[in-house]
Image: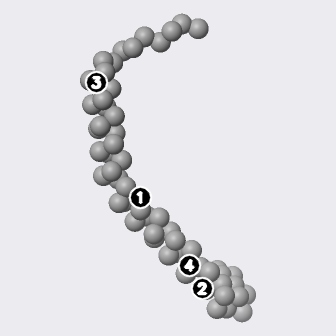
Amino acid sequence: MMEKENVMSKEERLFLIEALKRLVMERKPIYEGYQKFIQRENEMKKFIETKDGSYFKEEK
């Protein structure tokens, strides 16, 4: 296997790493909000299941 040549300089790599960190930090609140939404939805499903014993069942 051939050795991979360093294509980027150290400065370019540091710039890319910093840009990726910023992108992740910008998206983090959106992701955390989505996780909270999913958690609340799961809690509601459990609540409904314990209330009437069935969830989305057509039995009556």
- Residue 37 place in picture, x, y as percent: 45, 70
Residue at image coords 60%, 85%:
47
Give the amino acid type for the residue marked by disc 2 in the picture: Phe
Element class at badge 1: helix
Element class at badge 2: helix
User: Which residue is the site of mark 2?
Assistant: 47
User: Which residue is the site of mark 1?
Assistant: 31
Instruction: Specify the quadrant of the image occupied by residue 57.
Output: bottom right
Give the amino acid type for the residue marked by disc 4 in the picture: Glu
Whole-number angstrom distance, CA of label 3 to CA of label 1: 28 Å
- Residue 38 place in picture, x, y as percent: 50, 68
* Relative side of 3 to 33, left or right: right
Q: Are marks 2 and 4 in contact (CB under 8 Å)?
A: yes
Instruction: Specify the quadrant of the image occupied by residue 30.
Output: bottom left
User: Which residue is the site of mark 4?
Assistant: 43
Give the amino acid type for the residue marked by disc 3 in the picture: Glu
User: Which residue is the site of mark 3?
Assistant: 12
Number of other residues with Cα within 10 Å of mark 2, as a class: few under 14, some 14 to 19, many 20 or more: few
Which of the two discs, 1 and 4, labels the residue nearer the N terminus? 1
Viewer-proximal residue, 58 or 3? Answer: 3
Residue at image coords 33%, 18%:
8
Number of other residues with Cα within 10 Å of mark 1, as a class: few under 14, some 14 to 19, many 20 or more: few
Q: Quadrant of the N terminus?
A: top right
Element class at badge 4: helix
The single residue placed furthest to the right in the displayed view is: 59
Q: Nearer the viewer, mark 3 or mark 1?
A: 3
Number of other residues with Cα within 10 Å of mark 4, as a class: few under 14, some 14 to 19, many 20 or more: few
Q: Nearer the viewer, mark 4 or mark 3?
A: 3
Whole-number angstrom distance, CA of label 2 to CA of label 1: 24 Å
Q: Quadrant of the C terminus?
A: bottom right
- Residue 3 place in picture, x, y as percent: 51, 9
